[in-house]
Amino acid sequence: MKQTEKILGIIAIISTILSLFSIPFIGNILIISLSTLSFLYMYLGSILFKDIPFKLVIKQENFKEYDKIQKFGIYVMGMALSITTIGILFKFQCWPNSSLLLRIGLTGILASVIINLIKYNQIKSHNFSNILKRAAIIGVIGLFFMLTPRENILEIRHRNHPEYVEALKNAWADPDNQVLWDKVEEENLKILQKEIKSSNP
């Protein structure tokens, strides 16, 4: 499971970098990698944090050392990392509600870090060290994206498509104007057509 997490993380990083160079359809790979990583944190967080093979998950003795507070902290951390990961994806894609997702996720990470730090200072468990490392990495990345204006991300990602950038900025300024959103869809369709054309010379 830990290896899967690393692979997905590497794919997400590479996809993010390549997205800045307008590589056709690379955004789809980014979406898949971050969505899968979010799923792992949401439903399999305790396995990743404890660093045990997936085949041993059904053995309850692998989790008997956790008390109720520890289990709660691990659950909150898994949820928070999952939400933050999706928030990062939404912010990079310039999708709605990204800032809300990041605020919720980062608040959850902070709460879980406090809980786990208390327990870590008591028992010095390697498992909690794993949790805190992930919280630091995802938390810093999430905080960076939360503090970065979406306009800046839009301008960097689509610097080769100024018409799309302008159309989306206008739609953000007047979100109830359907004509502006239609213009966004029109410009987005042009980008997709260019990507298809470039991938099929």
Image (tube, grey):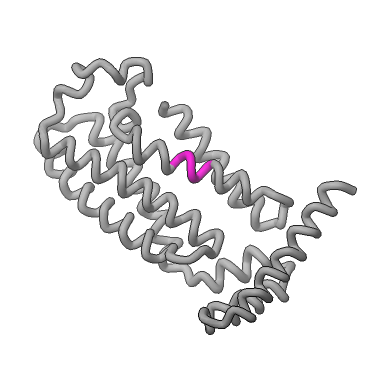
Judge from the rendering whether residue 24 lies leftward or rightward of residue 134; answer left or right. right
Q: Residue at x 14, y 24 (%)?
A: 65
User: What kind of secondary structure does the magenta stretch mostly adopt?
Assistant: helix
Residue 12 screen position, x and y as percent: 55, 44
Give the residues drawn in magenta, as a range: 33-37
- Residue 135 vs residue 73, the one in the foreground: 73
- Residue 57 vs residue 17, the one in the foreground: 57
Judge from the rendering whether residue 132 lies leftward or rightward of residue 91; answer left or right. left
- Residue 119 vs residue 93, the one in the foreground: 93
Q: Residue at x 35, y 40 (%)?
A: 42
Residue 68 screen position, x and y as percent: 11, 35
Residue at the front extreme, as displayed: 178
Judge from the rendering whether residue 98 lies leftward or rightward of residue 133; answer left or right. right
Labels in figure, total: 0
Asked if the magenta segment contains residue 14, the reply would be no
Q: Work out which quarter of the rendered image holds the N terminus and state it.
A: top left
Residue 9 screen position, x and y as percent: 50, 40
Tell me which corner region of the image, top left, top right, bottom left or bottom right, holds residue 98. Answer: bottom left
Tell me which corner region of the image, top left, top right, bottom left or bottom right, holds residue 123. Answer: top left
Residue 185 screen position, x and y as percent: 67, 69
Q: Is residue 56 above or below residue 17?
A: above
Q: Is residue 62 above or below residue 95?
A: above
Judge from the rendering whether residue 163 lies leftward or rightward of residue 152; answer left or right. right
